[in-house]
Image (cartoon, rainbow, N blue to C red):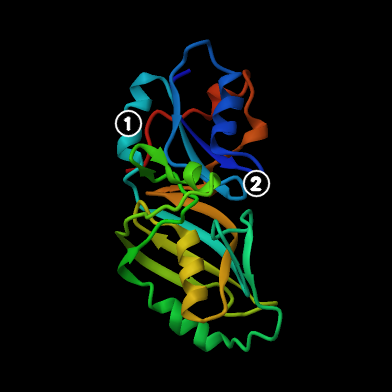
Amino acid sequence: MNGFLLINKPAGITSYDVIRQIKKCLPPKTKIGHSGTLDPFATGLLIIAIGRQYTKQLNQLIKFDKSYTAEITFGIETDSYDIDGKILKETKENLNLDIDTVKSKLNEFKGTIEQTPPAFSAKKINGVPAYKLAREGKQTELKSSLVTIYKVDLINNQLIENKISVSIDCSKGTYIRSIAHDLGRKLSVGAHLSKLTRTAIGKNKLINATNLNEISETTLKLHLKIDLEQ
């Protein structure tokens, strides 16, 4: 019962909820972990490692590049930069956005950029996750870091009801929520991340993942992988 699982995480649960459900199918005290958190509203690929031999490899998996599809909604800015956050600013009048302007500003994110994580993130400040401080109403000053955006392209080249869909290939440590927030600021209308799906971790694709509800004590072994694509 040792190996990797490629899981398609559904919306509405945490990444640890996925771990908790898979644990029920394993012998007690089995080592288990995942290769990078997805927020509760997000869906897509989680790589689950089962057994000490495989959980020891998670530090390497976390370094892999990632791919996502995302929906960005303009006119509403939230404290967490995503749909689950508290609305801080809302523009109800016509935003007067056009797709060419949006595309031009989106292109500014390509390459190696300096990015500041959201206050509601797992980044630690003096050993305390930033989101815990933010929930307590404490001011947080997160340091920016360099990340690389290899690709950020519009899907369907359309702006529908003040929303766009984009595909993004990026380095580890990239916050797609921050891209949405910063794009809204560049366009002076505000924005937040309203949908997110992780489609790849390195060369491991969502298309090869198993739905969480298909995992049980009897099926778990069928879905285990001994090796991942590097």
Q: Is residue 3 visible?
A: no
Q: Nearer the viewer, mark 1 or mark 2?
A: 2
The dot on residue 43 is: none
Using the image, determine if residue 12 lies above or below residue 175: above
Q: Looking at the picture, how far across and down is residue 143, in whole percent?
A: 32, 56
Residues 99 and 87: in front is 87
List the residue tagged with mark 2: 11
Specify the amino acid type for callout 2. Ala
Going from the N terminus, do you reach mark 1 or mark 2 first? 2
Image quadrant of residue 129?
top left
Residue found at x 36% / y 44%: 125
Tell me the SS state at disc 2.
Answer: loop
Label at residue 57 = 1
Position of 192 compared to 68: left or right?
right
Residue 204 at x, y percent in the picture:
43, 46
Type of the residue with mark 1: Gln
Q: Is residue 30 left or right of residue 143?
A: right
CA neighbours of label 1 inside 10 A, class few (<14), some (14 to 19), many (20+): few
Q: Quadrant of residue 218?
A: top right
Q: If the image is split into quadrants, where does the C terminus sit? A: top left
